[in-house]
Image (tube, rainbow, N blue to C red):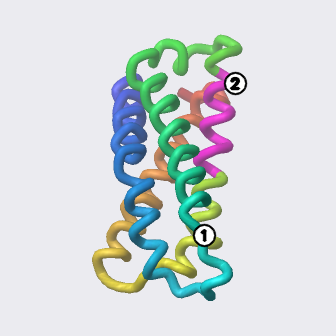
Amino acid sequence: MTTLLVLVGLGQIALALVEPDAAAQSCAGARRPRACRPDAADLLVYAGYILGTNLCLGTLSRSRRSCCSTVHTLARLTSGYATAYWGVRLVIQFVWFRQVAPRGRGYALADLAVTLLFVLWTASYGAVLLDLW
């Protein structure tokens, strides 16, 4: 299971480097009224939020996996935060992003890939939180 936690961490770091740019690029093609589209400042805040969270959680999972895979309070708190973060991100993926995302085979495959990663990450951190690891 420790290997899976390392892979979860590496995946989050990879997503941190890709997702802010992908979000900015797909926003222009989204089917939303102009008034509902975020401006540049909104995208920068969102990109910074994603980058910071994913780099921190990914690095913690990758380099300090013993901290995340034990029953210590810090591990529970960190895993609880990560479970909530990825669980909410998964719900947002289904409720919001799927409705406004550009259409096409490439976008559908990318959506499937990130959705499966969000499920894996939510389940992995949830298992640590619930001491199922």
Q: Main secondary structure of the magenta part?
A: helix
Q: What x and y, as percent, mark residue 65?
A: 45, 18
| Direction from residue 94 to residue 9 in the image, left or right | left
Q: What x and y, as percent, mark residue 89?
A: 60, 55
- Corner quadrant of residue 22: bottom left
- Corner quadrant of residue 14: top left
Q: What x and y, as percent, mark residue 102?
A: 43, 82
Label 1 environment density (alpha carbons within 10 Å; few <14, some 14–19, many ≥20) = some
Kindly report which numbered mark, 2 or 1, lies closer to the viewer in this rendering. 1
From the viewer's side, name the closer residue of 39 and 92.
Answer: 39
Compared to residue 86, the image places residue 126 above or below, namely: above
Amino acid type of the residue that numbered disc 1 sits on in the rendered structure: Pro
For residue 1, say whether it is visible. no
Total numbered labels placed on residues in the image: 2
Residue tagged 2 = 77
Residue tagged 1 = 38
